[in-house]
Amino acid sequence: MWQVAVLILSLSSLVYGAPQVPCYFIFGDSLYDNGNNNAFMTKAKANYPPYGIDFPTGPVGRFTNGRNTADILAELLEFETYIPPFANARGQAILKGVNYASGAAGIRGETGQHLGARISFNKQLINHQITLSRIQIITAINQSAAVNISKCLYTVGFGNNDYINNYFSPFYLTRRIYTPEQYATVLIQQYSLQLKSLYNSKARKIAVFGIGAIGCTPAMITIYGTNGSLCVDFINSAVQLFNAKLVSLVDDFNNNLSNAKFIYINSYQIALTLTPTTGLSVTNVPCCNATNTILFQCTPNRIPCPNRNDYVFWDAVHPTEAMDVVTTRRAYTALLPQDTRPSDIQTLAAS
């Protein structure tokens, strides 16, 4: 049944009218990266097998076995092709949007630095300004190609690495400097400035993904243990402090920024309320061989599990395509009232 649902979603992407929004811009970390890290000197890259084993063109930089959230959402929004990565987005293709996401990236500039090069949120915002300048040049030459940026969809997903590859990593001092409450506060303060910068670049329809239940990832469970619980509770508690402040920030933006349409995607809630019909029965171990407790990624060229649609986790931190399909569909069309706030992505796109 689940395989049929995935097939229907894949086939539906082949039949398009006009996209629901004129363009779609993606900011985030490895959950959304589709190749921006490939040429970097970094351990945070996924352009090798078994990554991409279920993607039509193989391992091209997505940190999963197939499509990621950005790809699935592009399908749901009825784009004819996936949104290209900034690394190779050129010409008229950028009029439909650009994916700036980068594995190991965070809200804080130092986040993920022990893994190598990555594109932080601040740097992604700079790259977006480059794109907007390119769009201006294209539309000056061909005015029929003009794009109303304020009607485009923006998705932003950061914070996971600010905890996994910063606060709860032994390579950083932040955990010694800040309590969980203080850290959540300083993160939100910086995130507020970054999101406001995006708004000042004429973005209006902005979906912000909260941090998921990272205390339930195989990586965190392996490192910290669960003390009899299903997950690492103190990590999830820290994440929930951040998410609560992010909800308040979204509400504040909507109340105080003219024509702002921010929504919050409750990734934490969605991950912990999977219904039995999803078929995702293996929830605590990765599908691929992922034994490196620093990198958390698949060992190159090792054969992964054959029943990938049964697994929540592809490697020790990233979801499978099957999990991404479930969570992205709930972000697009909320299944439960708590999934999104104040609306879902489908409603935001139509607004």
Image (tube, rainbow, N blue to C red):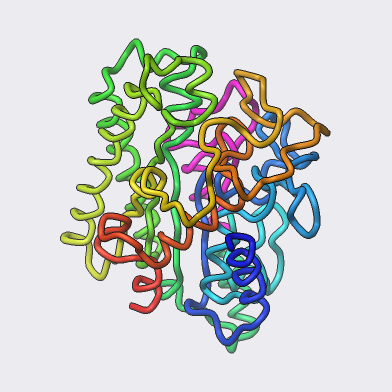
Question: Looking at the rendering, which quadrant does residue 201 occupy?
Answer: bottom left
> Which quadrant is home to the C terminus?
bottom left
Q: Would residue 128 be counted in the magenta stretch?
A: yes
Q: Is residue 243 above or below residue 148?
A: above
> Which quadrant is home to the N terminus?
bottom right
Question: Looking at the rendering, which quadrant does residue 200 occupy?
Answer: bottom left
Q: What's drawn in magenta, residue-wise?
A: 101-130
Residue placed at 59% from the left, 42% from the top? 311
Q: Is residue 321 above or below residue 147?
A: above
The residue closer to the viewer here, 324 or 35, is: 324
Residue 42 placement, left or right of 99:
right
Residue 196 visible, this angle: yes
Residue 129 visible, this angle: no
- The image shows residue 302 at horizontal and vertical percentages of 80, 32
Q: Residue furthest left?
A: 255
Residue placed at 23% from the left, 25% from the top? 181
Q: Residue furthest right?
A: 301
Q: Would residue 53 be counted in the magenta stretch?
A: no
- The image shows residue 84 at horizontal and vertical percentages of 66, 61
The residue closer to the viewer here, 94 or 19, is: 19
Residue placed at 59% from the left, 72% from the top? 96
Residue 17 placement, left or right of 209:
right
Q: Is residue 19 above or below residue 256?
A: below
The residue closer to the viewer here, 303 or 124, is: 303
- The image shows residue 350 at horizontal and vertical percentages of 38, 79
